[in-house]
Structure formats: structure tokens, C-alpha cells
Image (cartoon, helix red, strand yellow):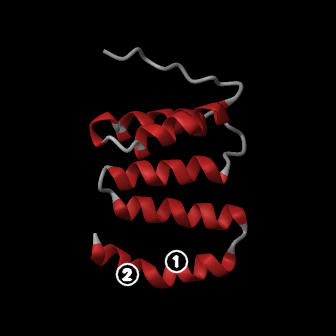
Amino acid sequence: MSKPIKPNIKKPFTLYPLAWHLVALNAPELRDASRAISLIESTLSTDEEPSSKAFSVLAAAYAEQGDFERSMDLQQKVLVKRGDYAEQALAQGMAPRRSRLY
């Protein structure tokens, strides 16, 4: 049984790598997207200016759960936060095709 993880409210960015590993581990039986979502969402509520990394990891967690619509919405936030408008336009153009693939 795993121990509960308490977020470090003063440094929420320290949880991003842990949440990423919970989503992207090579061993599917060790993945825990729900836990990753819980970790990231707890940091979003305390972080004054959430980073694009937080939204990126959250998007990956939702994709792992099969919620591709929500994942794509979060990836849009990532592109906007980064100011990458060329990629944002490309992503918007690809969204209808990507959702059909899933």
C-alpha cells in the first residue's frame, strides 16, 4: 500500500516530476493518472501563476484516463501560456482529426 503524498504548498512545482512519472511510467500497472491529477490540481489551487508544465502534465494525465477532449483543451492552455501562436493554430487545425483517432 502506498503512503499518501502531501503537496508542498510552498513549492508546488516540485510535484510535477512525480505526477509525470505517475502518468508516463513504462510499466502500465504502475501508472496512476487519478493520483497525478489529484497532485496537479492541488498545486493549481495554491499556485498564483501555474506554469505551462502543470497544465502539460495534467493534460497527459487526462489522456491516460482516456479523456482526450479535456486533454486537448489543456494543451491549448499550454500553447497560449507559452505564447506559441503558430503551434496553437496548428493544434486547432488538427483537433478534429486527432479526436477521431481516439
Quick check: 47 left or right of 63? right
- Type of amino acid at the residue the image marks with label 1: Ala
**Residue beneath label 1, please?**
91
Tag 1 near tag 2, CB within 8 Å:
no
**In the image, residue 85 above or below residue 22:** below
Is 57 above or below relative to 10? Answer: below
Residue at image location 29% in from the left, 42% down from the top: 28
- Quarter occupied by residue 69: bottom left
Q: Secondary structure at mark 2?
A: helix
Which quarter shows the N terminus?
top left
First reached walking from the N terminus: tag 1 or tag 2: 1
Q: Residue at x 51, y 59 (%)?
A: 74
Q: How crowded is the residue under tag 1: few (<14 C-alpha within 10 Å), some, or many (20+)?
A: some
Frontmost residue, 25 versus 15:
25
- Residue 95: x and y in percent read 42, 77
Q: Residue at x 36, y 82 (%)?
A: 97
Q: Amino acid at mark 2?
A: Pro
Residue at the image point whose x is 44% and y is 40% from the top: 37
Residue, disc 2? 96
> What is the count of numbered marks?
2
Q: Position of residue 72 (x, y in %)?
A: 45, 65
Q: Residue 79: x, y in percent?
A: 63, 67
Query: Is 27 placed left or right of 8 in the picture?
Result: left
- Helix, strand or loop at label 1? It is helix
Decide which of 21, 6 is in the foreground and name it.
Answer: 21
| Res 47 → quadrant | top right
Question: Which quarter of the rendered picture does the C terminus lie within?
Answer: bottom left
